[in-house]
Image: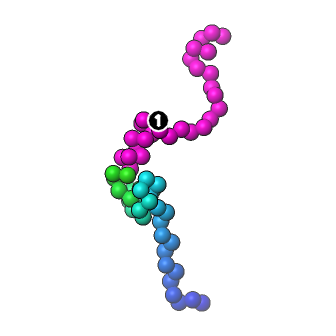
Amino acid sequence: MNDMAEAPKPLPACPICGKPQVKKLAPFCSSRCSKIDLGRWLNESYVIEGSDSPSAEDLEDQ
């Protein structure tokens, strides 16, 4: 049996700046990077691909 404890694996890098992430703020390294990410979502810079669904106007025409 190995008496040496394995070193914990490092956390992945912050997706905004690449610095090591802070466990409390995961996956970010700081509240600044967290706010930058939120701003990108709110400005619709990020897009999640999905199927086209009918709009309200399309449903009214039926």
- Residue 23 in view of the camera: no
Question: Along the horizontal axis of the image, is 60 left or right of 35?
Answer: right
Q: Residue at x 42, y 64 (%)?
A: 20
**Residue 34: horizontal and vertical position, in percent?**
38, 50
State which quadrant residue 23 falls in.
bottom left
Tag 1, which secondary structure? loop
**Residue 57: horizontal and vertical position, in percent?**
57, 14
Q: Residue at x 39, y 41 (%)?
A: 39
Based on the picture, tell me whether residue 56 belongs to the magenta stretch. Answer: yes
Q: Which residue is mark 1?
A: 44
Of residue 58 and residue 1, the one placed in the foreground of this image is 58
- Residue 44 in view of the camera: yes
| Amino acid residing under circle 1 | Glu
Q: Tell me the quarter of the image containing the N terminus.
A: bottom right
Question: Along the horizontal axis of the image, is 32 left or right of 5?
Answer: left
Q: Residue at x 43, y 41 (%)?
A: 40
Q: Tell me the quarter of the image containing the C terminus.
A: top right
Q: Which residues are magenta?
A: 34-62
Q: Residue at x 44, y 60 (%)?
A: 18
Of residue 60 and residue 16, the one placed in the foreground of this image is 16
So how many labels did they put on this image? Answer: 1
Based on the picture, tell me whether residue 19 belongs to the magenta stretch. Answer: no
Question: Along the horizontal axis of the image, is 35 left or right of 12?
Answer: left
**Residue 37: horizontal and vertical position, in percent?**
42, 46
**Residue 8: horizontal and vertical position, in percent?**
49, 74
**Above or below, comparing residue 52 to residue 38 in the picture:** above
> Furthest-top residue in view?
61
Q: Few, some or many C-alpha atoms within 10 Å of disc 1 (few <14, some 14-19, many ≥20)? A: few
**Above or below, comparing residue 13 to residue 44 in the picture:** below
State which quadrant residue 26 falls in.
bottom left
**Above or below, comparing residue 24 to residue 50 in the picture:** below
